[in-house]
Each structure stands twice: as C-alpha cells, then as structure tokens.
Image (spheres, grey):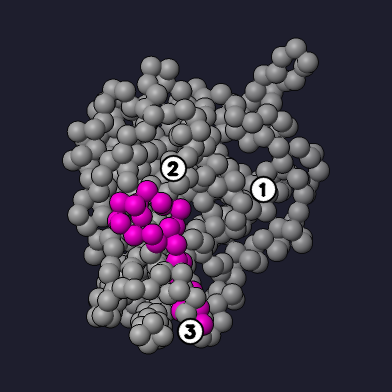
Amino acid sequence: MNIQTPLNSTLAVRDQFPAIPPGWHYLDSAATAQKPQAVIDAITRAYGHDYATVHRGVYERSAAMTASFEAARAATASLIGGEEHEVVFTRGATEAINLVARTYRNETRRRVLLSQLEHHSNIVPWQLAGYEIDVVPLTEDGRIDLDAAERLASEEHAIVAFAHVSNVLGSILDARRAADIAHKVGAKLLLDGCQAAPRLPVDVASIGADFYVFSAHKVYGPTGIGALWARPELLDAMPPWQGGGAMIDRVTFEKTTYLPAPSRFEAGTPHITGAIGFHAAIDWTRNIGLDALHAHESALVTEARAALRAVPGVTLFGPEDSAGIVSFALDGVHPHDIGTILDDNGVAVRAGHHCAQPLMDYLGVPATARASFAAHSDASDIAALVEGLYKVKRIFG
C-alpha cells in the first residue's frame, strides 16, 4: 500500500479494519482509533512467537525483543521529528503530562498558562502539582486566542500548555506562534498532541516545542502506551518520577543512583508488546502519509459540516477547517439521546462533555455530540449520520 492522495474522499483502507463490519459507521476515532490488521498481527506475533522480556536477558530472544522495543522508540520519535533518546514511553498522554507537571521545576515560577478548550488531562495534573492556572479564551470560531495568550503570558509562567488540536472543536493551534509566546517570557511550551499526531505532519523542532505528548491508541495503535518527547537538556535536569527496576544505576540501602533519561523515567517492566504495536501503527500511518490523511479528513469535515448545516435545528461548533472532528447539537435533544438513537441506526458517535467540562461551560451547553473521522471514514459515514439525525428529529417531534 502506497497511497499518497485521497480519492473521492476515501483512502480505500476500510477493509483493513476487522472491527468495522459492513453497515457499521465508526465516528469516534477522536476517543480511540480502530486498529488495522497490520497492528493486530504485529501484537499477536509479539505475544505468540517473539515474546521475551527486554533490557535484562542475555539470551538471543530477549536481545531481539530489546532491539524491537528500542526500534519502536526510534519510530515514535521519528513520527514527530525527534530523536530516540528524547522519547520516554508512558502509559499515555495523561501520564506524560503528569510526569512533566511533577518533575519539571522552575522554583521561581509556579503558574501555568492553559486555554479554555483543554482536555481534563491538561488541567488536573497541573492542579495536583500545585500550579496556579491562568486561562486563555477562544476566538469566535473556537481557536485558542493567541493574541490574548500574548497579553496573558508573563514571567510568572513556568509552562504554557495547549492542545495542538482540540479534541472537541478540532481547531488547530498555530504551534509555532505559541512557542514564540512562551519563549518570549522564558516559559516552556508543552503541546498535547493526542489529536494532532494521528492526522497532521508534526515536527517538534520547527514548531519549537519543549514537551510534546501523545497516545498510541489514537494513532491506530494499542491502548496503555504513549510518549513524552522533550528536549534532552530538560529530560536530563528532571528527577525520577517513579522508582523500581530498570531505571537504576546502582542500589544500596543507603543510596540509589539512576540511569540517564529516558530510562530514568521508565520504572518496571514496560509495555513491550504495546511498543511493538505502536511501531506497527506508526509504520501503517506513515505508509499512507500524514499529508494524505489530513487532506482526506479535511475533505470529510467540509462535507460533513455542509450536510449537518442543512439539517434543521443543528448547531455546529468549532472552525470550518477543523481537523477531523465535528461537534454539534440538535435543538431540544440531549446529546446522549442523539448518540443512543444513532447507535440504533449503526452510527457510533461520542456524546457528552468529552473530558472538557470547562469548554462546555464556555460554550453554554451541557454536552455535545461529536463525529470524528479517520483513514477508514468515507462519505457513507456522513450519509448514515445525517439519516440518523433525521430519525432523531422524527422521534422527538
């Protein structure tokens, strides 16, 4: 497979997803992506034929698995333009943000600048770590207002932490400008790349980010593993977060010394097969091409927003050029009811606050329905969604 351009709003890969049967329309990829057969096969092979522990065994199988595990780290780094030694494997983006919040320290600065659209995982860790939070508002079309961010950013901020792509609105951050704003006041920029990594080309160097986090399961990989990328000088200055095996240099009852980063942050036996599946997912995604994926999803968003706008009573949220995500409401119907009826029609969408309750308060709604696209999505998914919404309208009169 070497597809580089979308064809009639389809990448023709739907048959590679065994969990998507004919007649079922999966529009919840922003929550978690379905897995292509190549990823499933890689995980099965890792457990069934190649399995052994990593970093510790002197036998051939262990050495081979260690090489595969570290190759996965290199692939993960390469996906976002980083280097192997700059990537820490975590349980996901949430753990990665918690790691930074707990271990990165600027003793003279204890404030963090967030935006109104952040996921809870980019709010709560900062609160738990004792940071004071300042909030950047949104523009009228649902983007992080970087003019306001520039006014709010100060030398009291240790971190500026923004979503690269909103998980609710699909709005894309001007990440380069965000980095310039943070660095102008001496702060570091952390980007939540969960929704960007599966659908946009990312280059952390050209962006100017200091920390970048994302999860495998949104990039067509397995759950339970993700990545923290950080500038090496920052990782080198950060202390261990969790203690145990694999992250130590020498242990005595009087004193312990630690390995250099990234090993220092990876206590215990890692998610070995998760890393193998992550690598397979990255290879699969890059084989299609992130430019092609973005063009494909952009075409579907344009088509979906036009189709939904034609349904009486629908309110759309977010910008017209949202990245693969469309959130909406239907007058007089709770999004949970929308989701339930759509499910009866073979359409799976997410309904709720999407772990972004401050954003819901800002929008003045308790929840939204959200349709999110992926490589396997096509025009039939949009048609089924619209048909289902008319069914919702008939049921609710």
Q: Residues within 10 Å of mark 2 (few under 14, many from 20)?
A: many
SS state under label 3: loop
At 77% from the left and 60% from the top, the residue drawn is 49
- Mark 2 — residue? 122
Can residue 49 be seen in the rendering of this structure?
A: yes
Q: Residues within 10 Å of mark 1 (few under 14, many from 20)?
A: some
At 81% from the left and 43% from the top, the residue drawn is 59
Among the 4 quarters of the image, the one containing residue 53? top right
Query: Which mark is in front, 1 or 3?
Result: 3
Instruction: Assess whether mark 3 and mark 1 are in contact (beta carbons under 8 angstroms).
Output: no
- Mark 3 — residue? 345
**How far is the residue under mark 2 from the one under mark 3?**
34 Å
The stretch in magenta equals 342-367
- Mark 1 — residue? 271
Whether residue 329 is situated above or below residue 366 in the rendered picture: below
Mark identifier at residue 295: none
Residue 50, how many percent across, how many down?
75, 56
Whether residue 203 is situated above or below residue 347 in the rendered picture: above
Amino acid type at circle 1 is: His
Residue 350 is one of the magenta-drawn residues? yes
Amino acid type at circle 3 is: Asn
